[in-house]
Image (cartoon, helix red, strand yellow):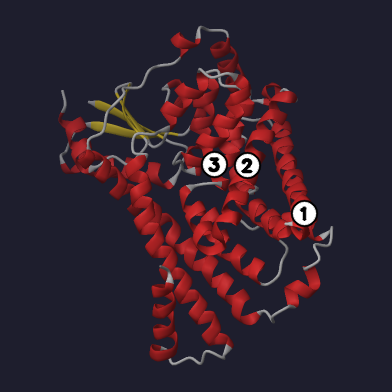
Amino acid sequence: MKNIIVLGSGCARCIKTAELIDKIAQEQSAEVTVSKETNPETIMSYGVMSTPAVVIDNALVHSGSIPNRNQIEAWLNQG
Amino acid sequence: MFEIFTQLADWLTYSILKLSPESKLGDAAHFFIEDVSKIFALLLVMIYFIALLRASLNVEKVRDFLATRHRGIGYVLGSGFGAITPFCSCSSIPVFLGFTSAGIPVGITMAFLLTSPLINEVAVLLLLSLLGWQFTVLYVAVGMAVGILGGVFLDAIKAERWLQSFAAKALHQAQNQNPSVAIIQPELKRLSLPQRHQFAKDETLEIFARVWKWVFVGVGLGAALHGFIPDGLIEARLGDGQWWSVPAAVLLGIPLYSNATGVIPVMESLIVNGLPVGTTLAFCMSTVAASFPEFVLLKQVMQWRLLATVFIMLLVAFTLIGWIFNAFTPFL
């Protein structure tokens, strides 16, 4: 079960990112939990400066844009 | 080179819409069609080429660069990078914290954040095409001066005292560490031409999707001013740069919130209608940089006291800019 966190200060692009990951995970019936993190202190602790950013099981995998479908599918299929 | 847009506007306004060139509506419609078509064409072409060039520049690189520079030059560089780095205002909090936790002084970080909304490639392109290069140079110089001097001032009053405690702690820790250890090196990637093209294409579509409605609103307001405000009204009332008109313009700009893209077409009409350059600059910079929603976001990393200081500093700066330019315009 993967634990996916979308980091972002509540901007439209961050919300879209979380929705997109949720949607693709459901399509693939992948076992994941998707949550959003808006606390600036927590975002800082991941060393992220451009949001939206994506953290999977505590590892930062992406930052600065809405990820595309291929990237998300690759994350979901890993490990 | 821009005549084609005038011809397009002539054809659409007078032949297709059958408006008379003498009527107010015809005048406003012509202005609107010419400016919107010109701006859209310029934006699409130029954003693409600029994005192609700066595909490998990002805030992480700027941070690493600034963290290793001398403080004096840091303000100038911070402001310069603020002008050229692509960056959305929704990222200002993570950028602020990223810079701070790399040990970059608050003043340099603020030089970056204050200049960023005032100057960007879209604004510069619009200024060049609508108001000419002299005004563009003036605008960029003034925008950078606000960022640089604002940053110097904030460090002089030791603004870091008034950060939220976790941000202050991060800054303190980073400054007491060996800087080479404190910075996590991001992976450096070299971009191939197809990758640059992809970036530039995405960037163009993204920026265009974000700004086109501002161009419509801005040019629409400009067209309304152009066609419906009687010639000479603004000039007669405010043309002498009466001293009170500048602070009034700054205050009026606070509740109005727009980005640089929307406000520049309005600037053009105000100047053409005879509003003095200083008053126009003061009004437009206040509209772009002093906005409540944005300041409330900064509350997450700053205490009220610092927030209020920055806000008042900006209002004073814009008022001074207005007065100085109104005083010197007659001699230019």
Residue that badge 3 annotates = B116
- Identity of the amino acid at label 1? Phe
- Chain ID of residue with mark 2: B
The local crowd at label 2, few if under 14, some if 14 to 19, many if 20 or more residues have their Cα within 10 Å, is some
Judge depth for marks 1 and 3 and give the one in front.
1
Residue A4 lies in what quarter of the image?
Answer: top left
Q: In this image, B20 relative to B210: left or right?
A: right
The local crowd at label 1, few if under 14, some if 14 to 19, many if 20 or more residues have their Cα within 10 Å, is few
Q: Earlier in the sequence, mark 2 or mark 3?
A: 3
Residue A26 lies in what quarter of the image?
Answer: top left
Residue that badge 1 annotates = B328
Quadrant assignment for the C terminus of chain B = bottom right
Does residue B60 appear in the picture of this structure? Answer: yes
Identify the element where label 3 is drawn: helix
- Chain ID of residue with mark 3: B
Residue B161 vs B291, above or below: the answer is above
- Identity of the amino acid at label 3? Ser
In the image, residue B250 lies at what x, y percent? 73, 54
In the image, residue B12 lies at what x, y percent? 40, 84
The one nearer the camera, B139 or A53, is B139
Residue that badge 2 annotates = B295
In the image, residue B117 lies at what x, y percent? 55, 45
- Identity of the amino acid at label 2? Phe
Identify the element where label 2 is drawn: helix
Q: Earlier in the sequence, mark 1 or mark 3?
A: 3
Residue B133 lies in what quarter of the image?
Answer: bottom right
Mark 2 and mark 3: Cα distance apart in space: 14 Å
